[in-house]
Amino acid sequence: MSETQSKDNGREKTYRTLGVGLILLAVVVAAGIWATFRFVDEQRARDIRNWEIRLGIVADSRTASVEEWLRKQQQAIGALANNASLQVYLTQLVVETSENGNAISEVPEAGYLINLLNNQAVMSGFWEPEEPQIRANVARPGRAGIGLTDATGKLLVTSGNMPPLNPSIRAAMAKAGEGKPALIDIYKGINGDPSMGFVWPVFAVQEDGSAKSIIGYVIGIRTVANSLYPLLFQPGDTTQTSENYLVRKDGSLVQYISPLVDGTEALTRKLSASDDLAAAFVIDKPGDFTIANNYLGSRVLVTGRALSTAPWYLVRTISEHEALAETDRRLTTMMGIFILLIIGVAGTVVAVWRHGTSLRAAELAARYKDTADQLQERSEFLKIVTDQQPTAIAVFDDEDRYRFANRVAAEEAGVTQDTMIGKKAASVLGPMLARSTTDMTAQVRADYEPRTIVNRIPADGIGGRERILKSDFIPLRSAHVSGKEVLTVFQDISDVVTAQERREKVLRNLVSTLVAFVDRRDPFSANQSRRVAQVAAAIAGEMNLPEDKVRTVDIAGNLMNIGKILVPPEILTKTGNLTREEMDIIRNSMVASADLLEEVDFDLPVAATLRQLQENYDGSGQPEGLAGAAILETARIIAVANAFVGMVSPRAYRSALSFSAAIGYLLEDADSRYDRKVVSALINYLENRGGREKWQHYSEPPVEGKPGNEGGDAASDDIPEDEA
């Protein structure tokens, strides 16, 4: 073979090798670009799935809130329909009016039913204050209330402000005639207020509950603007365009029954149920997720839920632009970077193939070594920091084994830190603490919500003392943690809790001592303050008030008469009628009680409560003329309790009033002297919580041989002047 042929063969081989290399390089570049586009699409789809989960969580949360609200309203009306007293009195009212021809005002049972409806309306929210009259001779219908009808639908008695029966209410009554409760769907009520309610059939006593045994209906109507619609707002939502609203199907249309963020009022907008309408999609496929047009034609991510207690659907949306703008921007940048990287790598791979490979391997090895060193340094730093803490700190894995324990945790367990790693909590902690710890870690792993628990550990052995441990449980989630690990901090708060309990005991002893001192000076009203405290605490509990307010009314009630130590004994023990000046001295003793206790550190507004006991709800009281919510709630409660105890307690100059008479006087002064909600809570406790039986001894006369006192309780007996 000639030299020329040899060179040609070598050149051809080189060209062939180069061609194959270029083809392979082109394939690699094309595959890289295709993989980049696919990666971008997968990332966008993953972000959309994340939004589906986020929207679903909010939709479930708001749906549950709306469902719970509906159940409470239905239960409030159902409780009346199933009330045996109401069934008996309604039966008698129907007989007297329908069969005997008597007027409703002539039937004694009507008054009881009206009081019962008023009380339930105030307690359950089916009540709203009367609006100002435009002209004195024009009565304005109410917006909310509870009414009773007979079996024909004739309205017999109602609570105050009951709206008129409209076609929507009549339709629900017809449905309830089948023997089951019916929903009065949302409609525009008085003044266009969105309103709804429930109709519940009332059956004759001891009947089988069939439609034939219906004697009447309980109808409850209320507005929803200030109670239902606020439940659609998701607490902590920081997005700008997200929205929750309620819709229902109206033939071939979708009606929006809650306000919209563009200012549209409830029950105003109706749209055709087209396939691409977000609300129509939720009605057709509740629980699914898609991207559709909202009521303004904007593209939104949407999901929703169907309500089980009403023909409504909750729709949760967020604009596609807000939800995916950052995603699209990030993915576009990422795609450009990836393409440039692929082209750059392809351009340099031939020139630096061998050399680059060795350098890259060396560089990666050095980088990984630096990273490992940094992680080791950080781990050591974390260990040093946690070991300096005075509390025991540990990390438990998904099987409640120790993954980490600081020095204090190891010392309390009596082992080394390395020995604790891998051990189960039950083998290190005591049985009670281990059981509560594993229970809490399981709950934290279930919902990833931090929790705190306080354990009282009994003394171990003679001479030991009880320990009180506060344990904080925090879920650990990151790119390198499975999400099942729980950080736990154990803190001994025995000294703090013991000091607090000792202070509480001293405070109680102080109160008891002061009450006993006052009782010794004023034997004629010895039990007044204690009974007021008992009634006030019961009212506060009935209103579901926080523990600090219950404690406030208890302490303030017991100390309300402490100011009587400044009243001359001859006035307190006077058996004749008091003069106006003497009456003023005793009344002012309540303000004196506040002055005497002003500097005592109760950690509660005891003195402020006592100072406002003579304020009236309408602002006509003293000393500052406060009105409504400006009066402390604790003062409003004690004022009602004081008046009630004074009326049902016997005095030398009169016998005790009956509980029913006392309730009547309190209701007469509701919204003027007293807060109606407080009065309603007292009535509910008397009627439904056994209050009448519990406090019946208040009406018993004093022990024979003890003198009466016509002036001793002038500051606390709140009986109307025509009965005093």
Image: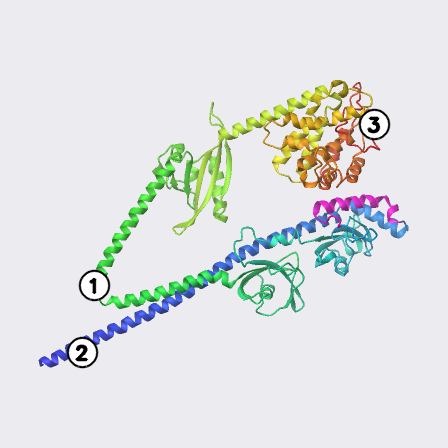
Magenta stretch encompasses residue 104: yes
- Rounded to the nearest angstrom, the CA distance separating label 3 from label 1 is 113 Å
Residue 153: image x %, image y %?
81, 56
User: Where is residue 277, by image quadrant?
Assistant: bottom right
Q: Which residue is drawn at 50% across and 57% down?
A: 53
Report which residue position mark 3 lands on.
654
Q: Which of marks 2 and 1 is nearer the N terminus?
A: 2
**What range of the chain is rendered magenta?**
103-131
Residue closer to the observer: 604 or 436: 604
- Rounded to the nearest angstrom, the CA distance separating label 2 from label 1 is 24 Å
Amino acid residing under circle 3 = Arg
Q: Which of marks 2 and 3 is nearer the N terminus?
A: 2
Residue 197: image x %, image y %?
71, 54
Q: Point out the frontmost of discs 2 and 3.
A: 3
Residue 513, compared with residue 358, is above or below; it is above
Amino acid residing under circle 2 = Glu
Label 2 neighbourhood size at 10 Å, few (<14), some (14-19), many (20+)? few
Q: Helix, strand, or loop for circle 2?
A: helix
Report which residue position mark 2 lands on.
12
As drawn, the residue found furthest toward the left would be 2
Residue 575: image x %, image y %?
81, 20
Q: Earlier in the sequence, mark 3 or mark 1?
A: 1
Report which residue position mark 1 lands on.
354
Residue closer to the observer: 12 or 627: 627
Q: Helix, strand, or loop for circle 3?
A: loop
Amino acid residing under circle 1 = Arg
- Judged left or right of residue 557, residue 84 is right
- Rounded to the nearest angstrom, the CA distance separating label 2 from label 3 is 130 Å
Q: Quadrant of the N terminus?
A: bottom left
